[in-house]
Amino acid sequence: MADFERYLVVGAGGVGGSIAGFLALAGKNVTCIARGAHLKAIRENGLTLISDLKGKHTLRMSAYEAEEYTEKADVIFVCVKGYSLNSVADLLRRASHAGTLIVPVLNVYGTGERIQSFLDEGTALDGCIYIVSFVSAPGEITQMGRVFRLVFGIRKDSNVAPEKIESINSALVDSGIHVKVSDDINRDTFVKWSYISAMACTGACFDVPMRDIQREGKERDVFIELSRESAETGRKLGIAIPEDILAHHLRILDSLAPESTASMQKDIARGHQSEINDLLFNMIRTAERCGVNVPVYRMVAEKFKNFT
């Protein structure tokens, strides 16, 4: 089995910070890319992880701004928001060598292909993640609930030795992360986009925590209809969408911490840049290209028409 020594996590927010924290707890050599007060706190005091799965730990690890990092990494987890992907293109190019594998875990469909276009060396896989986590203070990550599931796999136009995939899988499993090596990562990343879009758009539309979507009522009904509309869009794209996709979405939704909210919802409430273009408007545009009618997505979009 291939041995990877250097792990780089690009974007040490809720998702990236959780991946970095779990890997560091398992003794892996992890470096984080962060910025601002969050970076300063990690450098001075370490990364504090408050996890329903792992408890509370403060972990010393190397941390840099993107422009400062000059080394090469064996495995790179890309955990920035979709709107920030272009801003780390140069970093990914510089940090990759011929054998580097890059695992994107964004909420955006088609990320692996986009990252590959940035690279001179290395191979971009594709991936997605199911987790509720966020930066709770500078240098501090909170991971809520029992769900921490990372799905990754080889894009159909890539060629990666199976032992390299198994090495990443083993490192993540050893770290306590639930992993699936996908046999159809195009399908699985679309399914994640479908789920996170329905969940985030429902939460943002009604400005409610998960408990309101987990119980019977108008919020849950909207989540169900958004899930159906996005799944039909995937089928029109020719993706092998599972017949039980609604049950899949509801199962994940109902396992989340009742008090949790989606990161897009948090960002909108704070007046920050959000993923609303990727998770709402891009879904509608994709549906339009496929000839799929999405009236519930359009209802949500009407509330956020000033965000376009």
Image (spheres, rainbow, N blue to C red):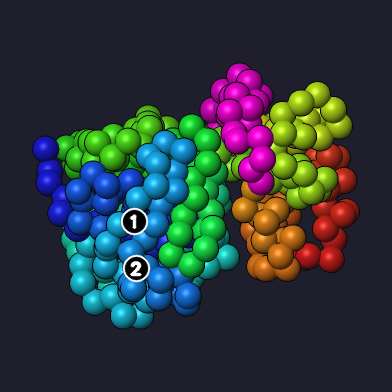
Which badge, 2 or 1, comes first in the chain's sequence? 2
In the rendered image, which residue does mark 1 sit on? 58
Q: Is residue 248 above or below residue 211?
A: above
Tell me the tag on residue 128: none
Residue furthest bottom as drawn: 67
- What amino acid is at disc 2? Asn
Q: Position of residue 188 (x, y in %)?
A: 49, 35
Q: Kindly indicate the quadrant of the structure image that contains residue 35.
A: bottom left
Q: Position of residue 32 (x, y in %)?
A: 33, 64
Q: Is residue 42 above or below residue 253?
A: below
Q: Is residue 250 magenta?
A: yes
Position of 278 with respect to 101 (left or right) is right
Residue closest to the eye, 157 or 55: 55
Q: Position of residue 154 (x, y in %)?
A: 34, 41
Tell me which segment is drawn in magenta.
237-261
Q: Is residue 36 above or below residue 307?
A: below
**Image quadrant containing the N terminus:** top left
- Residue 200: tell me if it is visible: yes
**Image quadrant containing the C terminus:** bottom right
- What amino acid is at disc 1? Thr
In the rendered image, which residue does mark 2 sit on? 45
Position of 15 with respect to 10 (left or right) is right
Please count the marks in the image: 2
Do residues under tags 2 and 1 come within 8 Å of each other at their CB atoms?
A: yes
Task: Identify the residue at image location x=87%, y=54%.
Answer: 303
